[in-house]
Amino acid sequence: MARLFPSSISGESKPAFLTPRRVLSIAFFSALAIAPVACGGDPPAADDLDVGDGDGDGSGDDLGTDGGTPGGPPLDGGTKELTPQQVDQIKNAECSGYNGEAEPAPAILEFIVDVSGSMRDPAPGGGGSKWDVTRAALLDALDGLSASMAVGLQLFPTAEPGPMCVESVGTVGIEQLGAPGSAHRRDLADRINRAPLYNCTPTHDGYRFALTQSLEPYAGEGKKFMLLITDGAPTLSLDCMGDGRTAEPTDPIVAEIAQAHGNGIGTFVVGSPGSERSTDGDDMRPWLSAAAREGGTPRADCSDSGPTFCHFDMSAETDFATALTEGLRDITGSVSNPCSFEIPSDAPSGTIDASKTNVIIEWGSAAPELVIRDDQGDCSEGWRVADNGQLELCGATCDRIKNDAAARVTLSFGCMSGEVPEFE
């Protein structure tokens, strides 16, 4: 079975970060009718459906979307308003080969969280220690994630300096979150609330343990992401080597993150207050920035030398609690994209024929619209099948979906794309 997943986040193409918490109800309905040739029946007079021939193509419609017919010109996106009667007729057409329920494409997120002794330091702006603030922000982020999101957790370190500085005692395995109050949500919250702090920072071991023991073996479907939260300076190198106090080289960590990205796993990085300097006085922000850049999640217009770093830099925030909460919402929203869709597991075909796929949006407080496929590349209003095979709404259409919690998307496979139906 093929599925459609959110676009991978890279320097060239990133889905917009989602700050509001929205729940999109998405359903497949019956098929989209295309023309009397495909679906049969004699069309009514044009005024019966309040349509004309405003584009002068002789088709009896005023939406100008006849480019979906074989041999026609490419479509150029946009949306056109439909009447409730048209929507009802579309949903009961005969030319669709399949109808079924769809959900936003799933995502998998592994949290890798620094619980070193420096997290005991006071947090800028109040709220207790840096760990107090981080713990509260993590719990808030988890509460806002959808039931379909698969989430895991790795705390590091899990012991004082020594040969076993990161072990499974700090692990919560990856599972789908489930509904509020689920066993997995409780396990994650319990591990976060009861986390002890230790006097070393084995960042490389924490990252590799989470990658190799949790994320890579996880067999569930979805785009995989890591989220590393740390206050900057690793004090143990790989295999728990070092004295736990002196800053260790960071290039091997960046290389590991780059390799993961090459294997399709993105890595977000949050630099907590304290990442502006190590115990030796070195600025840790450039390596965290490089880690985010090599992990495929750079901020816009960023540079490893600043002042806008590529990671989520919290080092200069006067209110760490607010900044971290908002940053985590941005990150979790960006990996859970309500504008990309997967093919239902019981669909007879695992691929999308763009010429025979149609999209309707029924808005919560506005007239329904036919969404037109965009073959021109700008993809502002409309939808497209991306290079990686994902069906995704274009930017402005996606933004409107995010701001309408009651919106429903109807997808129909089998009828020619972008044509306005003439009904029996």
Image (cartoon, rainbow, N blue to C red):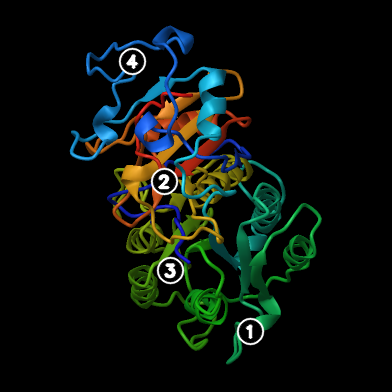
Q: Amino acid at mark 2?
A: Gly
Q: Which mark is residue 3?
A: none
Q: Residue furthest top?
A: 47
Mark 2 or 1: the one toward you: 2
For label 3, the residue is 280
Residue drawn at 27 percent across, 50 percent down: 12
Q: Amino acid at mark 4?
A: Asp
Mark 3 or 4: the one toward you: 4
Q: Residues within 10 Å of mark 2 (few under 14, many from 20)?
A: many
Do the CB atoms of the residues marked 1 and 3 lie less than 8 Å apart?
Answer: no
Would you place residue 163 above or below residue 411 in this image? below
For label 2, the residue is 414
Image location of residue 366, percent across then percent down: 55, 18
Instruction: Tell me the distance, in whole angstroms, between the alpha carbons under discs 3 and 2.
Output: 64 Å
Q: Is residue 159 visible?
A: no
Q: Earlier in the sequence, mark 2 or mark 1?
A: 1
Image location of residue 401, percent across then percent down: 51, 32
Local secondary structure at mark 3: loop
Mark 1 or 3: the one toward you: 1
Q: Residue furthest bottom?
A: 163
Q: Amino acid at mark 1?
A: Glu
Do the CB atoms of the residues marked 4 and 2 lie less than 8 Å apart?
Answer: no
Q: Earlier in the sequence, mark 1 or mark 3?
A: 1
**Quadrant position of residue 394:** top left
Instruction: Tell me the distance, in whole angstroms, between the alpha carbons under discs 2 and 1.
Output: 51 Å
Q: Nearer the viewer, residue 95 or 159?
A: 95
Q: Amino acid at mark 3?
A: Asp
Residue 14 located left or right of residue 144:
left
Q: Which mark is residue 167?
A: 1
Q: Earlier in the sequence, mark 3 or mark 2?
A: 3
Residue drawn at 69 percent across, 70 percent down: 197
Would you place residue 265 above or below residue 7 in this image? below
